[in-house]
Image: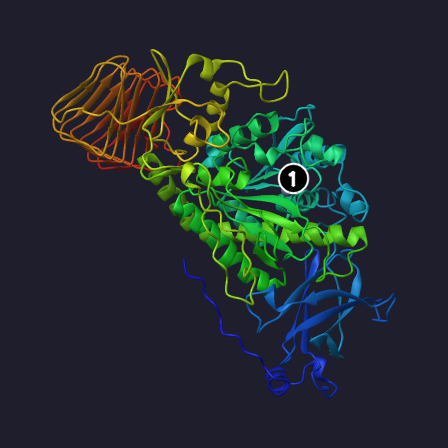
Amino acid sequence: MRYGRSTVTVLSAAVAVVLLGGGPALAQEAEPNQVQGLSVVQAEGFATVSWIPVEGATDYQIERTPVDASDTPTGASVITGVWLPNRQVHNDRPTFADAGFNPGDRFQWRVRARFAGSAQPFSAPVSGTTMPPWGDPTVPGENLRTQWETTQAAQFTSDVNELAYTAAIDQLNERVRVVEIGRTVLNRPINMFVIGYPTPPATAAGVAATFPLLINCNVHGNEPNDREGCLILARRLAFSSDARVIDLLSHTTVLIVPTINGDGRAANTRGNSTGQDLNRDYSLIRQPETFTFVRMLRDYRPVAGYDGHEFGNSSAGDLPMLPPRHQNVPRSIFDQSQDMIVRHMYEQGAKDGWWPCPYGCANGGNVGLSEETILRNTLGLKNVVNSLLELRSAGGPTRPDEGNPANNRRRKAYSAMWTFNEFLDYHRANLQAIVRARREAVRFQLANRGRIVFRGSRPIPAFPAPHPGESPPPVDAPDPSLILDNPPCAYKLTEEQYNGPRTDGPEGMRTTVAQRLEAHGWKVVKVADGYIVPMTQPERGLIPLLLDAQAVEELVGAERLLPTSNPGSGPLVVSSGVTCLVGRSVRGPVTVLPGATLIAAGTSFGGPVRATGAAGVFLTNSTVRGPVSISTTTGAAVIAATAVNGSVQLSNNRTTGGAILVAGNTVAGALRCNGNTPDPVNIEIANAVTGPRTGQCAGL
Ligand SMILES: [Zn+2]
């Protein structure tokens, strides 16, 4: 990916006068090095202060003074912001998002340059009334306010208040359906706002078809401010008649999980009530909170996500962000996530005055690595374009007026809301690219090609200084002991591994590996002596991280099944067990007999493929000269990214391992499906079919 970089141009005061043509800020003659062209634009919970750069300035101070309606000061002037050159990508157009004030109050702003700490004259002042909290106080619904809002950020919104607020939004509006996706260990509901216009689709599958986006607001209970931003955003999405909101919600569905960790929030602890850090559990899903969340991902299939946190490094940017870096994450997902952060968030941050930067910026330490247990990486492995969002905890040197906790909380909550709004706009403007990246990622994973890395990250390139990003998170190259060059074809679990009792997870709520793989949505084939999990699945990169003994945090050390060593090249009869073909060429017809399993990737078949009563059939990234006919399969089947020169017929399959996946195939013939339980699916990756599509495959 190439990162554009604009040329820095410093306008002199003389040029500025010409450009501005004697606006109000220039009524008096400028003093030497005085900031000119001050402008303040009000937005939701912040004000964008901008000015013309002063040549030679090393930083700027932003001053704010409370004023009354006639602009007479009513309180002391304070320096609320310090602009540093590494704050934004366009140093020639400096901006600062001033925040922390009580929305609706009126202020005056001034800005001055400093030369190596030596203050120059302040600009002429600009006054303005800040934007009040969103929603007409006289209109039902719009007039809802969170506990955090009504107490002017003195209190965080409690679980009781959240539930009442959420229920009111649900009841007063057709656009919002609140779904309880599960319960915490202590039985608190985990709700999700499902928001669409005029109404969200009625089912999870219907929502998935709209390529939804997901905001996870609060996994660490002691990092509460993203959640406050989320709750206010949900109200606006629910009730606003703004053209932008209607347009956004007409084109997709917004999923917002305000509080996955309600127990941790209530106790103000990072972990859940058992002490487990839930953001180290999204792959293992030992806890009911993460288990339920991952099951939701399986059913709603968001294509993009943001995960909200707070970061205790006072020198970092306002908004550290990071894409899924684990090297098993498909390249297209990594690239698109970086595009969202670097091209969109850095650019928009420079426009609005916020300071996104790569997580770890300003020597933030050994953070942002490749644990697949972290949602950022789990989502990437599940083909979701996404980013971590951190809100810098303390005001730090660039926001010196945050000793007052309410000021600090408001800056954080409204900067989170800014990010989530930008995320909505990015998704709206780039949906085709996001969907393309997802499709490419799924195809890559289905092919089961390339090495497996158990732990190790892609590097995050530095963005040229002095812009944000000159100090990205550390290189996290995989250790050779954590690389597997030749991926297995599948993993085989014993009965004990698959269905045996577990000791991880809270007592009374423990789940088996079978239940967890089902929550992930993986296809499993029951065979005579165990259970097979083929690698040719959409979440291939995550499979060995949970099932291989070489992994760092596996669930079980299952047996690796390697490609079949000598399958022959003539007509093939798979009569029992598992035959695995990788990159083979098979001349004759292929027959899979009852109870047998065929897994084929990157293989070319010179004749038809026929399976009757098979345990499993997996055809990916292959070509078939002749029809494909699969009936009465008992375990699982995947026909994907395969070119079939003939028709495809799926009939009377009763697959215990989940719906048959029929996705991204090119079929020169008909696609006929009937009598299958469950109905076949394409996870929003259409097939190209020249003949008719009939029965259960009519929409695939
Ligand atoms: Zn966190």
Q: Which corner quadrant holds the C terminus?
A: top left
Locate residue 551, reporting x and y percent: 45, 31
Locate residue 9, reporting x and y percent: 54, 78
Q: Which residue is mark 1?
A: 218
| Residue drawn where x is 55% and y is 69% of the image | 90
Q: Is residue 55 left or right of residue 662?
A: right
Q: Quadrant of ligand 1?
A: top right
Q: How many marks?
A: 1
Towards the viewer: 470 or 264: 470
Residue 521, visible in the rendered structure = no
Q: Is residue 448 left or right of residue 507?
A: left
Query: Which quadrant would residue 697 be assigned to in this image?
Result: top left
Towards the viewer: 635 or 362: 362
Locate residue 421, reporting x and y percent: 59, 51
Residue type highlighted by circle 1:
Asn
Towards the viewer: 657 or 686: 657
Mark 1 crowd level (few <14, some 14–19, many ≥20, 10 Å Cα): many
Residue 75, visible in the rendered structure = yes
Q: Is residue 532 left or right of residue 244?
A: left
Q: Which corner quadrant holds the N terminus?
A: bottom left
Query: Which quadrant would residue 585 be assigned to in this image?
Result: top left
Answer above or below: position of 70 versus 686: below
